[in-house]
Amino acid sequence: MGGHSCCYKQKLRKGLWSPEEDEKLIKHITKYGHGCWSSVPKQAGLQRCGKSCRLRWINYLRPDLKRGTFSQQEEDLIIELHAVLGNRWSKIAAHLPGRTDNEIKNLWNSCIKKKLRQRGIDPGTHKPLAEVDGGDDNTQSNSGKNSGTSDLQILVTPQLAMQEPTPSVSAVEKSLDESATSKSSAAPTRELFLDQFLANHESSSSCRSSNSMGYFPFSQASFAPDYGGGRTTSSALPISSNPLLWFSQTSRHLDVTNGDAISTVAPSLSSTILSTSMVPAPSCAADDALTNWYGGDCNSSRRSSVEDSGRIVLQSTCSSDSCIFPWPDLTPDKDVQVQLGGETEDLKWSEYLHGAFVASATPQAPIQPLYGDIKTGNQFPMNCFSTWHQNQQLQQQQLQASDIYGKDFQSVPLGFEHI
DNA sequence: AACGACGACAACCGCAAGAGT
DNA sequence: CACTCTTGCGGTTGTCGTCGT
């Protein structure tokens, strides 16, 4: 079957998505939610199968995606989670807000595996290559389904392995699953375990000598979030200098049931938070939703540029009716043009798209029910950005003097600049 | 400038599980 | 219980950009 029976019924497009297709899909899901994916292509006027639409949305168009390069800490977390969970990428992705299983899988296959081998670690078993016969890929053929099993004690982290009693793999998996699915309702003991696990992870990461990211200095208290709700977080938790990662870290500890608390913390784009606590404010007509989503304040004037670091900077120019993401003006035959130090440079569509996502403002259109069972894909908070944004100018002034933060950090505050 | 190698990433494919009938 | 449909997952392939020759 393969879920592609729909593809046989008519000649459907395959391959890369065009901007128009993206636009259609986004508009449709923005307005109606996706409902039944198999019906989305027809409803949205796409010559694609529902499966392809779903994949495109989940892996690329979803507004709560983080994008950007993985931080060292994220990589470490992936490695540790992989030791526990094996190739269950979706499970791993559940612990990395804003990251997709596909993204993590690609990272693993293209980058992390190589790094592990260079460190003399077999990526399949997470054991030293010397202990693995041959040390080749054959050894990892078992890693996918059996997911680590007995290797856990040596793999996850020394701290975790030394816990008394040592948690079984199933216990760790169970705890991980619960942490990803029911942050707000987990039993205290399990949550404690999760916190311990995560704290162990963080502390283990802090032992790494070659951490290019460094950790966020606690002395800069202005960066510390207001956790609202009094939810306690681990005081020993190092905060990454990368705020995207930082949001992710904090979001793992947040009680996401309190939307107000979220709004005072940070514009975490965690899908978990977004899907569980936020709904679009119904203050804008649905037809305007997309414009507002992408365009933010239509009265603002800005243009995009790419600095030497590659980050996208919103600077100026757009007409009052086209905003930063003027769909009608953006056709596939013309690349997005951005300013680069006075020079115009083409910008990859996807970069522009996600730059615009980051720069987006309030998605205020209520989802118009088109199906009985609506599964909205755009319930994410934008109104929470304002408080967070108030700190960004100060933060950016402070951080501009530092080179320890990655380009992701540079782009995000700018992205919210005009909200 | 042309070519190939390589890496990163997007997308496809096939399978399995769950829900509905 | 069998069947169909839908969704989700993981493996794999395809595409594109970059770099070195």
Image (cartoon, coloured by chain):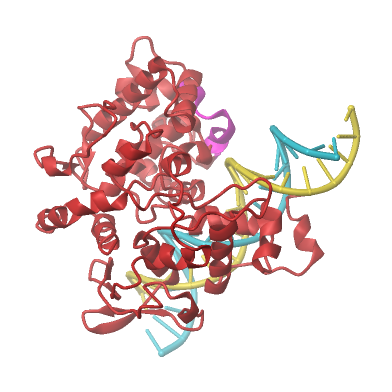
Chain colours: A red, B cyan, C yellow
Q: Position of residue A33 (x, y in %)?
A: 58, 54
Farthest top residue in view: A165
Q: In the rendered image, which quarter contains the C terminus of chain A?
A: bottom left
**Magenta residues: mostly which secondary structure?**
helix
Q: Does residue A76 appear anywhere in the picture?
A: no
Image position of A309 with respect to A152: above or below: below
- The front one of A26 and C21 is A26
Residue A114 percent coordinates (x, y): 40, 47
Drawn side of residue A368 relative to residue A271, left or right? right
Part of the protein shown in magenta = A138-150
Q: Image check: A164 left or right of B5?
A: left
Q: Is residue A192 left or right of residue A176?
A: left
Front-lying residue, A10 or A286: A286
Q: Position of residue A115 (x, y in %)?
A: 36, 45
Instruction: Tell which of A112 and A181 is nearer to you.
Output: A181
Which residue appears at 39% of the width and 33% of the height? A80
Q: Position of residue A211 (x, y in %)?
A: 22, 43
Whether A375 is drawn above or below A253: the answer is below
Query: What is the count of numbered marks?
Result: 0
- The quadrant in which residue A122 appears is top left
User: Is residue A232 found inside the magenta-colored segment of the image?
Assistant: no
Q: Quadrant of residue A75?
A: top left
Q: Is residue A21 placed above or below A317 in the rendered structure?
A: above
Residue plotted at (53% across, 30% down): A147
Can residue A307 be seen by looking at this rendering?
Answer: yes
Q: Residue at x 39, y 31 (%)?
A: A128
